[in-house]
Image (cartoon, rainbow, N blue to C red):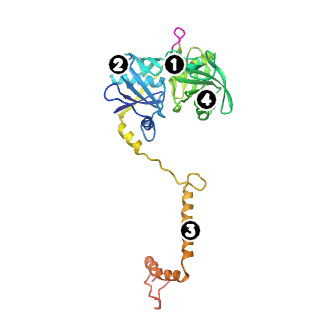
Amino acid sequence: MEFAKYQGLGNDFVIMDGRSGPPVDPDATQVKQICDRRLGIGADGVILALPPQQGGDLRMRIFNGDGSEPEMCGNGIRCLARFVADQQQGICPAALAIETMAGLMRTTLQDHGRVTVDMGEPRLEPPAIPTTLGTGARQVVAERLLVVGQVLEVTAVSMGNPHVVIPVADVDQVDLEQLGPALETHPAFPNRTNVHVLQVLSDQQLRLRTWERGVGATMACGTGACAALVAAHLLGLSQRKAQVILPGGPLTIDWRDDDHHVFMTGPAQRTFIGHLALDSLAAAAATESPVVPPVSPLGEQATEDDAATDTEAAAYAQAMSFLANTSLDEMLKLAANSLPQRTRRRGGPPIPPPGEPMPDWDRRGH
């Protein structure tokens, strides 16, 4: 099957077109192999373009790098819109209605490879996120939560998928590798959550770092940028429209006052195309067997030093067994019989049988 690789601010996806032909439905193992950056193509996720089911122009399914299926992806849907335009060689309509698990999303192609997406209204009620925080409240804003030994003030927003936003003084000083997994799997978020640390540069410019659910730290997250803008405005830290700067670059986010929809504008770019054999991936997964390294007596993986020590121990045990089970006479006979062989290997003159005189030769063996 032909695939295309697209990226939006460094958030990259393998996209396959399943709108015609045989069904395309990779399983979790195949998705993980495709996304593996050493053994596969390498991507943050896999996107399928599928026939519509509810009156849209097409339907999107997206899979995270771990094989899980999220409800929505902002960078992913921009890449999908650009993919459809590229597939149809510029005759694609400027606006598309794309069905997702988070509802119908409308995309509009812009100049210079950019795409605007109407992300709909943010969902702020705790059950809609979902979260156990703020029970009975209309919003989850600056709720105190104990995470990895520290109390954080978190704001939760759903953009069709769950997000938690934490304002900080400097996003670069946050240990996201520790905080991200701890918050992603926190019991307060029954469906797990995306995690974002937010730094306010001004009321129209924000910085964001992201830990994506099922992926890890990424260069960008479109739905996360939307959620961060909403959270910042609810906290009184920004206006309703601002530039959100991610490690991969900026997105423009506009939470409109008239209909309360969030609009996201940013780039999407094709990086390469190729062919993928899903059957080969399935066969490789079925025959793949893990290599189990030897275990040292301490229960840790054996190193080269451990292997050398084991070899020495085996040789010592063999020598001790030989000494214990061989008489002195047998040892002398073995030594006498082996002397001529060892001499010939070294290039010296032949050794006469026992009882005959040894020949004369100088110290150089002549």
Q: Position of residue 310 (x, y in %)?
A: 55, 61
Residue at 44% x, 21% y is 100
Seen from the viewer's position, the closer of residues 94 and 58 is: 58
The amino acid at mark 2 is: Cys
Instruction: Tell me the quarter of the image containing the C terminus.
Output: bottom left
The residue under label 4 is: 187
Find residue 143 and report its horizontal and vertical position in percent: 66, 22
Q: Determine which quarter of the picture holds residue 286.
A: top left
Ranked by sequence position, the earlier of labels 4 and 3 is 4
For the residues labelled 1 and 2, the Cα–Cα distance comes to 24 Å
Q: Which residue is mark 3?
A: 317
Residue 88 lies, in percent from the top left, at: 33, 22
- CA–CA distance in space, label 4 to label 3: 55 Å
Mark 4: which amino acid? Pro
Q: Nearer the viewer, mark 1 or mark 3?
A: 3
**Which of the marked residues, 4 or 1, is nearer the chain's N terminus?**
4
Badge 3 density bin: few <14, some 14–19, many ≥20, Cα 10 Å = few
